[in-house]
Image (cartoon, rainbow, N blue to C red):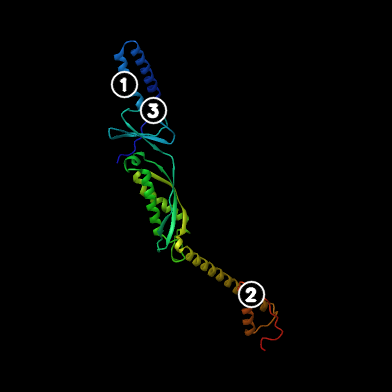
Amino acid sequence: MNPEKTINPPSGFSVFILAIVLLIAAVFCLSSGLEVIGFILIPVSVIFLLPGIIVVNPNESKVLTLFGKYVGTVKTDGFFWVNPFTVKKKVSLKAFNLNGQQLKVNDSIGNPIEIAAVIVWQIKDTAAAVFAVENYIQYVNIQSEAAVRHLANSFPYDNLEDETAAITLRGGAEQVSAMLEKELNERLDRAGIEVLEARISHLAYAPEIAHSMLQVQQASAIIAARKLIVEGAVGMVEMALNKLSEKNIVELDEERKAAMVSNLLVVLCGDKAVNPVVNTGTLYH
């Protein structure tokens, strides 16, 4: 594969003016009876001078080949003249946005998920983009889809089913994006393409298991909340018993302590309002 070679051809203004002058001279010669000179000047201007003039816009380039051989790439914007027999292919140097389609794949533990990515890429080597692959835009699309599928297969969606997972697709967004960008750069380097940014734009469970996984998430959240409530309630009960004992407000035997602990835990851990009951008797009757 030919490495990129940047060239700076001469300005095209002088050649353009020369071509116009030759055309005027050819018309004058034809009208003055000098047909031979006129017929010579016209091909020189039309075939050898004007076809070699190129215009390169900002953030664009022209890849030049002459009889099947790579000549070089013009990356400087402006008005130039090159060999008129070269084939000139325009290659954009602007940043491209690829909004990938939603893919249905399995994560590392087999759950079907939907995933999509947004990728920003740019051509850094015009020779590789033109000569190394058939169609660099199609190449980016296919390799990006393959990279996203491989990423989804490498990690679990979250750690509900795999608590040992250090990185998950849902929780490790920054790390996942960095790995996706690295893999894309490795895959697209052959085509002379650099990935500037890669981000997961859509991530969800597949519809057929979304409801079940939502119930799992809700149950996990309820368990975590209950655990926190119980830990807080036990601490408050312990604090209440210690305060009563320190200030000698009331002397409680083991049975009354157990009853008090039971009542406080019901009040603190219940998910509904508690209706107080006044006991006019005694715990022992």
Q: Which of disc 3 and disc 1 is earlier in sequence?
A: 1
Disc 2 element: helix
Residue under label 3, please give it. 80
Residue 43 is tagged as 1
Q: Nearer the viewer, residue 203 or 182?
A: 203
Q: Which of 218 and 267 is in front in this view?
A: 218
Image quadrant occupied by the N terminus: top left
User: Marks 1 and 3, Cα distance to the nearest angstrom?
Assistant: 20 Å
Which residue is outermost to the top? 32
Q: Which of disc 2 and disc 1 is earlier in sequence?
A: 1
Neighbour tally class for label 3: few under 14, some 14-19, many 20 plus, Cα within 10 Å = many
Disc 1 element: helix
The residue depicted at 36 percent of the width and 43 percent of the height is: 136
Residue under label 2, please give it. 267
Q: Which of 265 and 96 is in front in this view?
A: 96
Callout in the foreground (1, 3) = 1
Is 57 positioned to the left or the right of 3 in the image?
right
Q: How many marks?
A: 3
Q: Can residue 192 be seen in this view?
A: no
User: In the image, residue 107 lies at what x, y percent?
Assistant: 41, 60
Disc 3 element: strand
Name the amino acid, label 1.
Answer: Pro
40 is higher (above) or lower (below) than 282: above
Marks 1/2 in contact by CB < 8 Å: the verdict is no
